[in-house]
Amino acid sequence: MPLAVELPVSTLPPASSLLVFAAIAAVLLALIALQKPSTTTKASWLPAIGSEKRSYEVWVLQYSVVWMGSFAVIIAAQLYESFDAVSYFVVCGGLALPLALQPFVFPFAKAKEESRPVGLSHALRAQLWIAIFGFIGNYWYTHYFYCVLRARYTMPSWRLNGVPIAMYFATHFYFSSYHVFANMTLRRVRTGFAAGRARMCLTVALVLAMSYATAFMETLTISNFPYYDFEDRHLAYTVGSAFYGLYFVVSFPVYFAIDEPGVGPPKPGVPLVEVAVSSLGAGMAVLLALDLVRLSVVGAPLAIGGKLWEVTG
C-alpha cells in the first residue's frame, strides 16, 4: 500500500478573498459615482504646501521605502534564520529609531523657523500617538490573537508580557506608514468632494475598506515568515483580517484629525498630553471592540498568560 504524502500547508489566502475585495471595490466605486466635486477646496492627497504636517508625511513615505525594502531582503534571503534575540531587537529597534528621533535630531525647516517648542511639532505629536497606540496593541491586543486565532511567535526573543519586544518596535514603523497612507486617502475624499451625506457614507466605507485591506495585506506579506504562525491560516485571512482591521476602524479617523485643519481635535497647539489622551482613548475603544467581537462572534475564552519579562529561544 503506497504511503500517503503529506502536502505542505499553503500560506496563500483562500480564493474567496477575491470575491470579498471585488465586492469592496464595487461598493466604493458606487459611492464615488454619487459624489459631487468640491467647490470650496482643491483636491489634495497631502497637507498644504509649506506645512510641517506635509513635511512629516512626505518623510514617512520616503522612509517607508527603507523599512519595507529592508524587510523584503530579510524575508526573501531568509536572513532571519541566523537571527537571535539580540538580532531581532537590533534590526527592528534600528528601523524604528529614525522615526522616533527625527523630531529631536533633524526637525523640519518650518518647525525650526518658527522656533516652537518641540512638543508643538506635528512630527513629535504624530510619533507619540503612534507609540502609545502601538504599545497598547502589542501589550494587550496580541493576546486576543493568541486566544482567538491561536497565533504564536516562535522566534528567539526578549519578551514583554509574552510579546517579543522586537514586535513593539516593528509595529511602530508599520503603523507610522499605515496611518500616513490612510491620511492621504481620507484627505483626498475630504478635499475633493462636496460635504454632505454622500461624502460621509464614502468616508465610512473607505475607513472600513482600508482597515480590512491593511490587515489582510499584512497577513499576506508576512506569510513566508515561519516564526509567526496561526493554527488555522484560512481563519487568519478571513476572520483574522476583520478582527485585526478593528484596530484601524478606530485609529485611522482619529489619527487623521491630529493637526488637520477643520477636523481636530487634537488641534494644532494643544499640549502633548491631549495627543496622548486621544491615543489612549482610541486604544480603549479598540480593546472594547475586540472583546465584544470575541464574546459575540467567536466565543473563545480569553486567557492572558506570559510574564512581565522573559527570554525565549
Image (cartoon, rainbow, N blue to C red):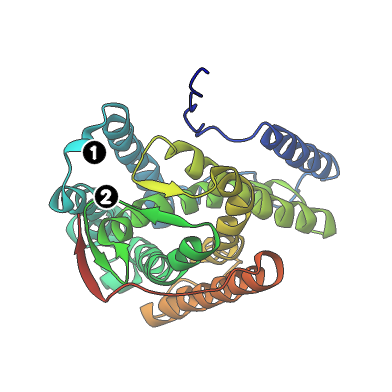
Residue 205 placed where, x, y %? 73, 52
Residue 80 is labelled as 1
The quarter holding residue 153 reads bottom left
What amino acid is labelled 1 in the image? Tyr
Camera-nearest residue between 209 and 129: 209
Q: Residue furthest left?
A: 86
Q: Secondary structure at mark 2?
A: loop
Q: Determine the residue positioned at 21% across, 49% down.
A: 88
Q: Is residue 266 above or below residue 154?
A: below
Q: Which mark is residue 155?
A: 2
- Residue type highlighted by circle 2: Met
Name the spot of residue 218 as percent of width and height, x first: 48, 44
Q: Quadrant of residue 65?
A: top left
Tag 1 near tag 2, CB within 8 Å: yes
| Label 1 or label 2, whichever comes before in sequence order | 1
Q: Quadrant of the C terminus?
A: bottom left
